[in-house]
């Protein structure tokens, strides 16, 4: 992605990490001091809008408020969340309303045909809670049948063979049952209104819809039936142009059924019957019995301490602990001394990623089917062992998974309410817009999450009927002392742990504020070992390190000298939203940040 010119180099002392007190809630930090006695970091080789304070490369100031906040990938979804909060709804109520809106507004990334994960701060119990809303593979689809439809050893991204039970609506119901304040039906009113009356499609979402429709039209694409998808989103042509008004009356009707009949309308009622009939008609495997058997679960997040910051992650069948593994490895190095956006800093982070992702390929899977050595993987002792494999002056040519002791397109959003509840939520249809399949008259696409199953004998993530596939979607949450600090996420396939790590390092080691931490140029490493349909053939043995165009030239040269193969920017650096919790004396302050690489915004009041 083209980025503004960034600094050619930064002295380590220019960005001192803030002190982190072990207190229940973090105080408001002072205005960032990039140099002693100055309010900004100002260099004549950085021109990004001449901001008078803070990071000169930041795209904007965070949105501040005392009563609530929301950040999403679409301004209308953000507004809907704020409206629910103003109406007296909880952060969970707002999150459900936001997600329903995004299913219409951002169908390239999410919808009720996909899965959903969340972490939230419960102000009553003063704890981070986790929810895994991931559906299982159809019980009628055997491993033999799945293998017969594999392409180059992996399941294809399109078609019924990769469809698993959608977990989103059930996840909404679990959250609302425990934390909702408004009536269930009220939460769907904004989305029903938008889907019925229409909304203009912003630039990036319009682009990705058009690109997905091209794939759906390709001959021999493996999709059993494309008419419903094309009818829903083509708008009589090739798809929406920027600013085109889009409507989805089928989805509005489906939302009404869910609003009136609750989650059972989806999993046991008329929607389930329609889904069953559709997959029988096209020769797929998902059945009403699979839907009726589905149930999400509340889970306890894993946690590591990174230099005084508590970083939380979901285990289950996700890649969440990769973030913890990366940070544990990096804690063995002086990241502040390495210098912000330096070659050494990016080198250390990317090497930590390569090591963690070898374990990700070897061990991560549905714990209901395989014993995953999570505590060992996220231990400080193991991280210290892995850190010894990193040399600061050159790339490790051969990284492998550790030896355990015996025994993929997404939307992220976050919101917070007047009582201190903060919700970090991520929801996805996976690759592209999903499987390409839309049941008759329902207006949403089914996920292709099953593509991430392994087909290798003996692998913990090998396909099995009724099993949850490996998941890339992970919400993020960070605490300080005994209180919440930041609800955040960086959506985008295997970029997510890499992006989450960069946010934490930017904030903790380099002192960036909640908005600047996301605006900072990013790196993305491709080519780690894979056991599923995310393989990247044709890359060098050590993979490809992509850098955003804002990374300094001197940094690029330093990375090349260490042996990295650098790739061009491809705009695949994830999309970030965050809400930070602060205290100004006895009063709560929220600071909400949004991604400059996408169509969304953050608001607070």
Image (cartoon, rainbow, N blue to C red):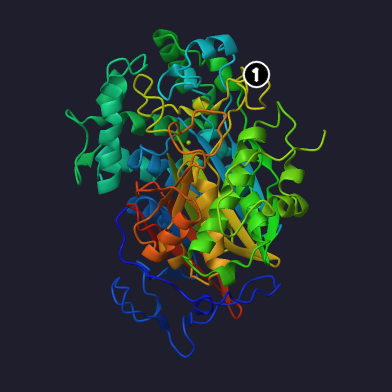
* Residue 20 position in % (x across, y down): 65, 73
In this view, which residue lies farthest toward the left? Answer: 237
Badge 1: how crowded within 10 Å, few (<14), some, or many (20+)?
Answer: few
Tell me if residue 125 can be seen: yes
Judging depth in this view, the residue of 507 and 485 nearest the camera is: 507
Q: How many marks?
A: 1
Q: Residue at x 66, y 31 (%)?
A: 366
* Residue 75 position in % (x across, y down): 34, 54
Q: Secondary structure at mark 1?
A: loop
Residue 557's image quarter? bottom left
In this view, which residue lies farthest toward the right? Answer: 406
Q: Residue at x 30, y 77 (%)?
A: 50
Judging depth in this view, the residue of 375 and 292 nearest the camera is: 375
Q: Residue at x 34, y 22 (%)?
A: 441
Quarter of the image for the C terminus: give it: bottom left
Looking at the image, residue 603 lies above or below residue 161:
below
Looking at the image, residue 114 lies above or below residue 35:
above
Residue 8's image quarter? bottom left
Judging depth in this view, the residue of 265 and 328 nearest the camera is: 328
Tell me if residue 92 can be seen: no
* Residue 17 position in % (x across, y down): 58, 74
Q: Which residue is mark 1?
A: 457
Looking at the image, residue 500 lies above or below residue 58:
above
* Residue 538 position in % (x across, y down): 43, 32
Q: Is residue 72 left or right of residue 420?
A: left
């Amino acid at each position: 992605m083209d980025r503004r010119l960034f600094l050619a180099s930064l002295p380590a002392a220019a960005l001192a990490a803030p002190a982190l007190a072990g207190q229940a809630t973090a105080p408001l930090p002072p205005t960032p001091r990039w140099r002693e006695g100055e309010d900004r970091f100002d260099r004549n080789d950085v021109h990004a809008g001449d901001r008078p304070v803070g990071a000169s490369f930041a795209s904007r100031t965070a949105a501040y408020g005392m009563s609530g906040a929301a950040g999403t990938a679409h301004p209308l979804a953000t507004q809907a969340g704020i409206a629910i909060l103003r109406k007296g709804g909880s952060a969970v109520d707002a999150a459900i309303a936001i997600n329903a809106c995004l299913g219409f507004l951002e169908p390239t990334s999410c919808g009720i045909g996909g899965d959903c994960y969340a972490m939230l701060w419960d102000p009553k119990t003063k704890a981070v809670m986790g929810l895994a809303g991931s559906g299982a593979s159809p019980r009628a689809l055997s491993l033999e049948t799945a293998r017969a439809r594999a392409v180059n050893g992996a399941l294809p991204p399109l078609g019924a063979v990769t469809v698993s039970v959608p977990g989103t609506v059930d996840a909404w119901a679990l959250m609302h049952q425990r934390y909702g304040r408004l009536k269930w039906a009220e939460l769907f009113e904004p989305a029903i209104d938008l889907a019925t009356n229409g909304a203009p499609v912003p630039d990036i979402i319009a682009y990705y819809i058009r690109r997905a429709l091209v794939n759906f039209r390709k001959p021999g694409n493996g999709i059993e039936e494309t008419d419903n998808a094309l009818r829903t989103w083509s708008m009589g042509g090739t798809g929406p142009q920027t600013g085109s008004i889009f409507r989805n009356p089928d989805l509005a009707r489906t939302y009404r059924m869910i609003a009136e009949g609750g989650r059972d309308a989806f999993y046991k009622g008329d929607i389930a019957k329609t889904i069953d009939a559709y997959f029988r008609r096209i020769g797929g495997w998902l059945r009403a019995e699979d839907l009726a058997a589905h149930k999400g679960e509340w889970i306890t997040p894993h946690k590591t301490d990174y230099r005084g910051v508590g970083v939380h992650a979901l285990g289950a069948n996700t890649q969440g602990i990769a973030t913890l593994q990366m940070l544990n490895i990096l804690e063995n190095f002086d990241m502040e001394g390495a210098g912000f956006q330096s070659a050494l800093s990016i080198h250390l982070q990317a090497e930590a990623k390569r090591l963690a992702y070898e374990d990700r390929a070897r061990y991560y899977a549905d714990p209901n089917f395989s014993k995953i050595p999570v505590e060992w993987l996220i231990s400080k002792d193991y991280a210290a062992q892995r850190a010894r494999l990193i040399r600061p002056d050159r790339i490790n040519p051969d990284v492998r998974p550790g030896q355990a002791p015996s025994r993929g397109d997404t939307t992220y959003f976050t919101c917070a309410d007047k009582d201190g509840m903060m919700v970090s939520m991520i929801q996805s249809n996976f690759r592209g817009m999903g499987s390409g399949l839309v049941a008759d008259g329902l207006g949403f696409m089914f996920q292709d999450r099953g593509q991430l199953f392994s087909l290798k004998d003996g692998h913990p993530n090998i396909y099995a009927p009724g099993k949850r596939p490996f998941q890339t979607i992970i919400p993020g949450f960070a605490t300080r002392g005994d209180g919440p600090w930041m609800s955040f996420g960086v959506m985008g396939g295997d970029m997510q742990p890499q992006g989450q790590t960069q946010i934490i390092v930017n904030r903790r080691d380099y002192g960036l504020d909640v908005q600047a931490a996301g605006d900072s140029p990013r790196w993305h490493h491709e080519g780690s070992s894979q056991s599923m349909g995310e393989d990247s053939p044709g890359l060098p043995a050590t993979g490809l390190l992509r850098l955003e165009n804002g990374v300094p030239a001197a940094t690029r040269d330093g990375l090349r000298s260490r042996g990295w193969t650098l790739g061009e920017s491809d705009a695949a650096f994830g999309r970030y939203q965050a809400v930070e919790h602060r205290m100004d004396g006895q009063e709560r302050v929220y600071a909400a940040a949004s991604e400059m690489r996408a169509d969304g915004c953050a608001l607070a009041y």
